């Protein structure tokens, strides 16, 4: 087992521990706070954050950790990082609050501005997706289940588009309309990426703001499954390249042989 594979195994264990803590809160009544950016925060976010950050620091003491819930690390410090963990302890807090089950735990290892390892856990279903550079992408259907490889699919004649449950706008609808016939499936959090990675969807278009912790782990899964996550000019999403932690608008695609961006931009 390579060092990266060993780290991948331990980070999957951490994700499941965090998922269990999230489900304890989910099963009971809980308070919802509002952060400065108007996004919600619950005890589940913080419980998951504490478990993951402590676990990663114990696993790899020399690798810094950037989590959504501890994001105030100065750019002058971050810019020196060549390798670091990027964590969203609970992606889809709005879906968590709605109790629709569509939320995830995201853990990514970034090297040279690109994700080389990504773990995405769906706590309610128990499904865990992970991608390891050079090894591929895999799905554990539940705790203790043997991992099985997942892969993106060749583009369908009528594309399936994974869309946001809580975000979307007229501009996005207009771009998707340029595809012609397509089927839109709305779902929350990083599950949209996972649909592309396992071959159940062809595209996920995201317009509007997202943060780097929202995408990194799932990008690793999609890329190792044979897909890509690119900005609207075709460039791969990169991480920790600037002071801001916001991503550009992007497209997740399963079949890179299709020029999806030309179709979406066609007038």
Image (tube, helix red, strand yellow):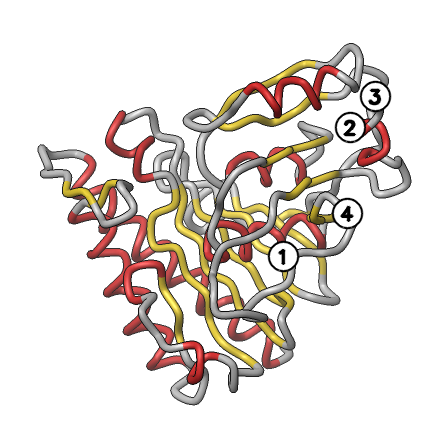
The residue depicted at 33 percent of the width and 24 percent of the height is 100
Q: Residues within 10 Å of mark 4 (few under 14, many from 20)?
A: few
Residue located beneath label 3 in the image: 267
Which circle's residue, 1 or 2, is located before the other in the chain? 1
Residue located beneath label 1 in the image: 220
Report whether 169 appears left or right of 224. Answer: left
Q: Which is more toward the observer, 138 or 34?
A: 34
Contact between labelled residues 2 and 1, with CB atoms less than 8 Å apart? no
Residue located beneath label 2 in the image: 264
Which circle's residue, 2 or 4, is located before the other in the chain? 4
Image quarter of residue 205: top right
Q: Residues within 10 Å of mark 1 (few under 14, many from 20)?
A: many
Picture disc at residue 233: 4
Q: Callout 3: helix, strand or loop?
A: loop
Distance of mark 1 from mark 2, alpha carbons? 24 Å
Q: Position of residue 49 (x, y in %)?
A: 28, 60
Decide: is 137 above or below 100.
below
Contact between labelled residues 4 and 2, with CB atoms less than 8 Å apart? no
Q: Callout 4: helix, strand or loop?
A: loop
Q: Callout 1: helix, strand or loop?
A: helix
Decide: is 57 above or below 14.
below
Which circle's residue, 1 or 3, is located before the other in the chain? 1
Q: Position of residue 66 (x, y in %)?
A: 39, 69
Distance of mark 4 from mark 1, alpha carbons? 20 Å
Q: Residues within 10 Å of mark 2 (few under 14, many from 20)?
A: some
């Amino acid at each position: 087992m390579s060092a990266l594979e060993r780290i991948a195994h331990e980070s999957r264990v951490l994700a499941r521990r965090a998922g269990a803590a999230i489900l304890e809160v989910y099963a009971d009544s809980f308070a919802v706070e509002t952060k400065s950016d108007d996004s919600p925060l619950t005890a589940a976010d913080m419980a998951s954050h504490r478990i993951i950050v402590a676990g990663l620091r114990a696993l790899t003491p020399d690798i810094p950790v950037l989590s959504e819930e501890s994001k105030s690390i100065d750019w002058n410090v971050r810019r020196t990082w060549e390798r670091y963990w990027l964590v969203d302890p609970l992606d889809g807090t709005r879906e968590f609050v709605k109790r629709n089950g569509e939320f995830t735990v995201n853990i990514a290892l970034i090297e040279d501005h690109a994700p080389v390892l990504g773990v995405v856990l769906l706590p309610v279903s128990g499904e865990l997706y992970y991608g390891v550079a050079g090894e591929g992408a895999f799905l554990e259907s539940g705790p203790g289940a043997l991992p099985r490889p997942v892969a993106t699919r060749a583009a369908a004649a009528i594309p399936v588009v994974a869309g946001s449950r809580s975000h979307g706008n007229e501009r996005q609808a207009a771009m998707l309309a340029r595809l012609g016939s397509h089927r839109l499936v709305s779902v929350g959090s990083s599950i949209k990426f996972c649909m592309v990675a396992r071959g159940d969807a062809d595209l996920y278009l995201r317009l509007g703001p997202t943060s780097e912790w929202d995408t990194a782990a799932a990008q690793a899964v999609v890329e190792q499954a044979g897909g890509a996550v690119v900005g609207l000019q075709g460039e791969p999403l990169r991480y920790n390249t600037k002071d801001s932690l916001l991503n550009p608008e992007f497209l997740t695609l399963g079949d890179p042989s299709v020029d999806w961006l030309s179709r979406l931009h066609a007038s």
